[in-house]
Amino acid sequence: MSPLRLAKSDVWKRVYRRLAAAVFLIIVIATTSWAQKKDPPQKILIGTTGIQMAIFPVMIAKSEGYYRDEGLDVDLVVMRPDLTIKAVVTGDVSFSAPFTNAARAAMSGYPIRILMALMTGTDHSLVVKPSIQKVDDLKGKTLAVSAPGATPDVSTRIILKKFGLIPDVDTKILFLSGGSTLRFAALEGGSVDGALLSAPYNKMLVRKGFRELVYMKDLINIPFNGLAANTNMMKNNPDLITKTIRATLRGIHYIKAHKEECLKIMAQTFNLKDSELAALVYDGTVPLFPDTGIPSEASMKETIDSGRATQRITRAVGISEVADWAFAKKAYGGLQFGNK
């Protein structure tokens, strides 16, 4: 082969190699971009009455990235109990957290069902000024609750009736629809004599010298907080519900398996600088978080009976009219807990 032909051959080889390298680089870049391109996480809003231990599993599932693992971006929206129901019915939020409000709404015909429980019982207690020694001392006093028909309101009335007092007659019931923090501030500031509060706020006031007069778990067996959705979402987007519940159950598992880490998070979230108080709140609340997200049948019947009495419903109401555990069963059945 002549030197000229050999030179031309070498040139073409170099051109081919460069072209091949360029094509390979383009393919690598395109493949990498395609692999990295994902659908943005789906926004999920959960309506809750306050940032408290009853919603802690959701907070942990968010901070640990369990919702992100499911392609979800979850945020909590604090609002009045009645507004969470309206918002979930209209679709302005994806889920409503107040348990008894959702049950009563379903009994009244609203297109809403409870899909999981976050707590199998209530951690509420009636916290009062130190001068109040017994329930009878509440005569003539003012008690703070949240919205009419919400858990604090219903529970306070149960306490008064249980001990022979007439609500709104023997005591004044003041509605403060700003969550536990507002009732906490009202009692601490002295503008009310007592308030029904959940953890950690009830225990924080005890540390300040106030008294827990009555524990609701001694009087009722009703779940507290959960996830309720409208029936259209159940029909049209069942996978989203299952994903949300599955991530939330992972949050519950994490809480039970990582006490020290959770105590640090509680200290920051609830301003619980007292380590003994934080441990007290943790130990008293965590056993109420259900591994499966499904409460007992007995507690559901008590929830329904309480709702029927409050709303003066005379007909029988079945659990299926207020709750659907199929999503929780599917979510729990597909869980495989790792180290997290």
Image (cartoon, rainbow, N blue to C red):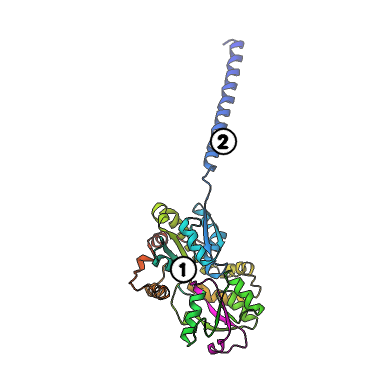
Q: Residue furthest front?
A: 169
Look at label 1 and name its amino acid: Asn
Image quadrant assignment for residue 7: top right
Is residue 143 shown above or below 231? below
Q: Nearer the viewer, residue 312 or 197?
A: 312
Q: Label 2: which residue?
A: 29
Q: Which residues are magenta?
A: 123-151
Whether residue 251 appears in this view of the structure is no
Q: Disc 1 vs disc 2: Cβ atoms closer than 8 Å?
A: no
Picture coordinates of residue 87, whole percent (x, y): 50, 59
Picture coordinates of residue 239, whole percent (x, y): 42, 53
Q: Label 1: which residue?
A: 101
Q: Nearer the viewer, residue 37 or 18?
A: 37
Residue at the (54%, 43%) spot, across then down: 36
Q: Label 2, secondary structure: give it.
A: helix
Residue at the (61%, 75%) spot, across then down: 184
